């Protein structure tokens, strides 16, 4: 009985404190601050695609050009996948998944938005598309596609992007996004890496070990 009364008292005290905090926030009179002025002359490049490629390679990304989805499939099967297996010592067949119907026959198709994300815990390679890229930092905007966790849970990530959708800078990127229709998305630049521990670079610390980008003509 005492325990029940103590829990009730604690709950009421918590609710009272929470209500006071909420009321204080609502009553706070915040001074209006104007939006900052637009940035004048943001950086641009004579060849955004070349700049994007150079920056991406500098942060450990493989960048390739392709004229069709079939060309991507051919390169993946004949060159890129064997290279990944050799580099990372993978002897077993890779589990590959894709949200792109064009990759059917090469990778499992992800079509069910209700798919349990835990079923993807052993995915080796994910093949997806990016909406656009940014030349100044090689970031790719990847909106939520079917399964939010897919580009982060896989060991190796492959992204396809239209080379005509390579922008100069982040200012152009946010203008293109506007308020955004996507419920979730992320800018992805390079494979996952950290050098926090003893200044030793580790790839795949908290995400994909490698990233390959196919610039679609």
Image (cartoon, rainbow, N blue to C red):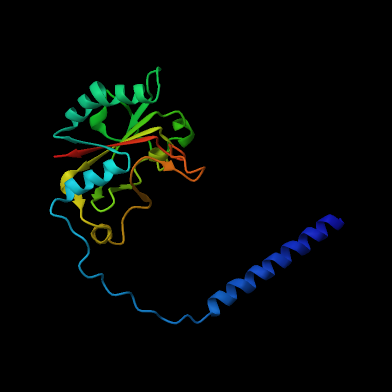
The image quarter containing residue 36 is: bottom left
The image quarter containing residue 37 is: bottom left
Q: Nearer the viewer, residue 122 or 205?
A: 205
Residue 27 in sight from this viewpoint: yes
The residue depicted at 21 percent of the width and 61 percent of the height is: 43
Q: Outermost residue toward the right?
A: 2
For residue 41, above or below residue 62: below
Q: Nearer the viewer, residue 55 or 182?
A: 55
Q: Nearer the viewer, residue 75 or 55?
A: 55
The residue depicted at 59 percent of the width and 75 percent of the height is: 23
The residue depicted at 27 percent of the width and 48 percent of the height is: 138
The image quarter containing residue 94 is: top left
Q: Quadrant of the N terminus?
A: bottom right
The residue depicted at 19 percent of the width and 32 percent of the height is: 69
Q: Position of residue 214 (x, y in %)?
A: 22, 37
Residue 130 in sight from this viewpoint: no
Q: How many marks?
A: 0
Q: Position of residue 217 (x, y in %)?
A: 13, 40
For residue 175, above or below residue 30: above
Q: Position of residue 38 (x, y in %)?
A: 26, 71
Q: Nearer the viewer, residue 12 or 151?
A: 151
């Amino acid at each position: 009985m005492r325990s029940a009364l103590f829990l009730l008292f604690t709950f009421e005290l918590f609710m009272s404190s929470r209500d006071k905090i909420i009321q204080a926030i609502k009553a706070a009179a915040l001074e209006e601050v104007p939006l900052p002025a637009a940035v004048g002359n943001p950086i641009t490049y004579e060849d955004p695609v070349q700049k994007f490629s150079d920056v991406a390679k500098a942060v450990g990304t493989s960048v390739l050009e392709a004229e069709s989805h079939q060309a991507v499939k051919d390169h993946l099967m004949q060159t890129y996948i064997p290279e990944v297996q050799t580099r990372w010592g993978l002897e077993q067949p890779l589990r590959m998944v894709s949200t792109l119907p064009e990759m059917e026959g090469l990778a499992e198709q992800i079509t069910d938005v209700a798919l349990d994300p835990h079923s993807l815990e052993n995915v080796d390679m994910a093949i997806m598309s990016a909406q656009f890229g940014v030349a100044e930092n090689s970031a790719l905007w990847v909106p939520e596609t079917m399964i939010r966790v897919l580009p982060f849970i896989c060991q190796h990530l492959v992204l396809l992007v239209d080379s005509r959708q390579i922008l100069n800078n982040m200012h152009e990127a946010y203008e293109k996004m506007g308020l955004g229709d996507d419920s979730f998305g992320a800018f992805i630049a390079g494979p996952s890496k950290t050098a926090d521990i003893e200044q030793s670079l580790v790839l795949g610390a908290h995400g994909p070990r490698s990233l390959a980008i196919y610039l679609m003509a």
